Amino acid sequence: MPAYCHKQEDIPDFMQRVYALDEAGRRKLKFLYRQSGINRRYSVIPDYSLPAEAWQFYSPTENLEPFPNLEKRMLWYKQHAAPLSLKAIHQCVENFSGSITHLITVSCTGMSAPGLELELMEFLQLPPTTFHTSVNFMGCYAAIHALKLANAFCKTENNANVLIVCTELCTLHFQKEYTTDSMTSSMLFSDGAAAVLVTGDNGKKGLNIDHFYSTVALKGKNDMAWQLSSKGFLMTLSGYIPELIEEDFNGLVNDAVANAGLQMEDITHWCIHPGGKKILEAVHTSLGFTNGQLRDCYVVLKEYGNMSSPTVLFVLKKIMHALKANSSAKIFGAAFGPGISMETFILSS
């Protein structure tokens, strides 16, 4: 996590100042934040819970002018993305004795060429011949896309050790217009990084990648979107998204499980991207859950908010740490992104 932890209850003070809300608007905003299912979020920006005179990223003026342009946001991304990535990577590989053969970086909140993957190769002192690539601008499901790539490398190269790092600085892209999209984004999103190592060596301790499955609900293509602009990246988040997921998710899961030759009853753990409280409630309703199957997802949302691509890996880490030695587990994972694209995986121990 980045350095600055913001309590969810403190952030509305910043938002109220920026949005210039009347008393009714302030009460509504505070109510929405209390109902978000989030206790705290992390950011590379300290401003969100500081008085205006202490702000570092935003101008301490009534209308935030001059408002941060895309260049300033990408400068902050370049300053903070690599150090945050390295923190996650070092935790991931601290007990790994092999050599990294492939590096995949994932991000939808910052881009440049040369990019983050080359920065990390240099910091990690990886050989210049290391295969490197990046998954950019795919949103919250991008970690699963990266796992697909890593799995493909490992299937063709038994000695492959693929390092994936997902790094998102979502809070760099706050927009000051008081719209539903802006308000929802500012209530949910946060910064974070997660790394995972995928190896072709079946003798290593860890989980096995069994299956992937994906689909796109094109009827929702205008309900979740992520666009570039001169003042930062712009998020579209329709209130219709939970309804779409509730309507389609049960069918997606059944198709994915059947495609893997399994039954729903075979799944022991559920690793669902906690895009928001309403998203998890939609999944809960769609699958007819009754016994806290999404507990780890709710905990990650509560402790960190929605970090985009790393978030599903935070849930997976909680599940992995809770697994008992020599236990037999089938983990079903899913995440959602612009499109609306839905990606899934099945892992086993």
Image: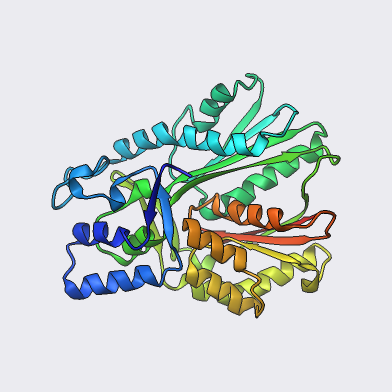
Quick check: 58 left or right of 91?
left
Residue in the foreground of this view, choosing between 104 and 205: 205
Can residue 135 be seen?
Answer: no
Residue 200 rendering spot, x and y as whole percentages: 80, 38
Residue at (67, 31) in percent of width and height: 102
Using the image, determine if residue 21 lies above or below residue 58: below
- Residue drawn where x is 29% and y is 69% of the image: 29
> Looking at the image, which residue is at 80% across and 31% down?
159
The answer to whether 338 is drawn above or below residue 23 in the figure is above
User: For residue 182, which quarter of the picture?
Assistant: bottom left
User: Residue 343: in sight, yes or no?
Assistant: yes
State left or right for residue 302 relative to residue 22: right
Q: Quadrant of the C terminus?
A: bottom right
Q: How many numbered discs? A: 0
> Between 82 and 27, which is closer to the camera in this rendering?
27
Q: Residue 315, position in %: x, y?
A: 61, 57
Residue 253 % position (x, y): 69, 69
Q: Position of residue 91 (x, y in %)?
A: 61, 38
Q: How is the image coloured?
A: rainbow
Kindly identify the residue that appears in the image at 70 percent across and 54 percent down.
Answer: 320
- For residue 65, side relative to residue 192 (left or right): left
**Residue at the farthest left position:** 62
Q: Is residue 214 left or right of residue 264?
A: left
